[in-house]
Image: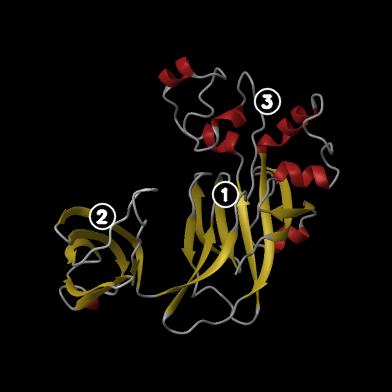
Amino acid sequence: MELKGKWKLYYFIDGSIKINSMEDLKNSGIACVPATVPGNVELDLSAAGVLPRDLFKGNNIRETERYEIYEWWYETTFIAEKPSELYDVYLHFAAVDCFADYYLNGIKIGHSENMFLPNDFMVGDQLLYDQVNTLHVNIKSPVIEESKIEPDVSTISTSWNRSSKSSNVRKAPHSYGWDIMPRALSAGIWRNVELQYKPKYRFTQLFFVTKSITGNCAHVTLCYDTVLPIECLNGNSTLIIDAECGDSKHHSEHTITFKSGKLDFCIDNAKLWWPKNYGEPNLYNFK
């Protein structure tokens, strides 16, 4: 279930107001504007008339600099259906910029410090099923968070902006300003948010590689990672492979002894993938 669209955005100087509970956001007279997710705080402030409508005109972008020491609280609500016992429930954040804490129904569920990486938080025990759930994302000022980190002053010698501000923060470097880019030290939930239902027992990664071909036989290696309970390991589980491409079929069964690993098998009468003008680009369906 996608949680993109209209959210609320509260903002104030980082640390100037103590938030002890989510009710403090509503009861402390904190500034609030509508927000769009995915998006970023400057565009939301611009849409609300707090910042100029056209941030790329003249020196308008400079007006965003005073918000570099602000913290931001995103808020939305949603209703979740209760899954079967065979599924776990996760909140998936594709990317958040940058120092963020996550709260579901007032309970902290996670933390992140990288604007480029996705984050998944298991929330099955915190959700209120078939009721209204409230989700908050608190994004801290990157300037203030960076000031808490002891710098390696040797990195300043190669720094464009004459400081160590960006050397320890996993943000887009150009946001600190380059010779051809204005400084725009943004924040926000800049990629999608989803409530995901995943099978309790599942593959998380699969990778097939054809190692060699002997006659009509293709020697294939499968590398895998799974989510499995402890009782299914130590040789108590079987991985079944079925592959098909036209009249070429394969079936094999393999005992697995750990959550991740690799195994080898051969496909007889293998159909090959040929480049354009050399033959058919055959592909196998695996399950």
Determine which of the numbered discs, if any, sits on residue 173 in the image: none
Q: Amino acid at mark 1?
A: Val
The residue depicted at 41 percent of the width and 24 percent of the height is: 152
Q: Are marks 1 and 2 in contact (CB under 8 Å)?
A: no
Bin the neighbour count of mark 1 within 10 Å (Cα to Cα): few under 14, some 14-19, many 20 and up: many
Which is more toward the observer, 126 or 85? Answer: 85
The answer to whether 89 is drawn above or below residue 75 in the figure is: below
Q: Secondary structure at mark 2?
A: strand
Mark 3, secondary structure of its residue: loop
Residue in front for this viewpoint, 45 or 280: 280
Image quarter (top left, top right, bottom left or bottom right) of the N terminus: bottom right
Residue 5 is left or right of residue 258, and the answer is right
Q: Nearer the viewer, residue 220 or 253?
A: 220
The residue lying toward the viewer, choosing from 206 and 35, is: 206
Q: Nearer the viewer, mark 2 or mark 3?
A: 2
Q: Residue at x 53, y 32 (%)?
A: 147
- Identify the amino acid type marked 2: Val
SS for callout 1: loop
Indicate whether 67 appears above or below 239.
above
The residue identified by callout 2 is 209
Say above or below: 243 vs 180: below
How much space separates mark 2 and mark 3, taking CA atoms? 45 Å
The disc label shown at residue 96, or none: 1
Residue 216 picture quarter: bottom left
Q: Alpha-carbon distance for marks 1 and 2?
A: 34 Å
Res 201 quadrant in image: bottom left
In whole angstroms, how far apart are the C-alphas of marks 3 and 1?
Answer: 21 Å
- Tell me which numbered mark, 1 or 2, is placed earlier along the sequence: 1
- Badge count: 3
Residue identified by numbered label 3: 182
| Horizontal arrangement in the rendering, residue 277 relative to residue 209 (left or right) | right
The disc, 3 or 1, on the residue closer to the chain's N-terminal end is 1
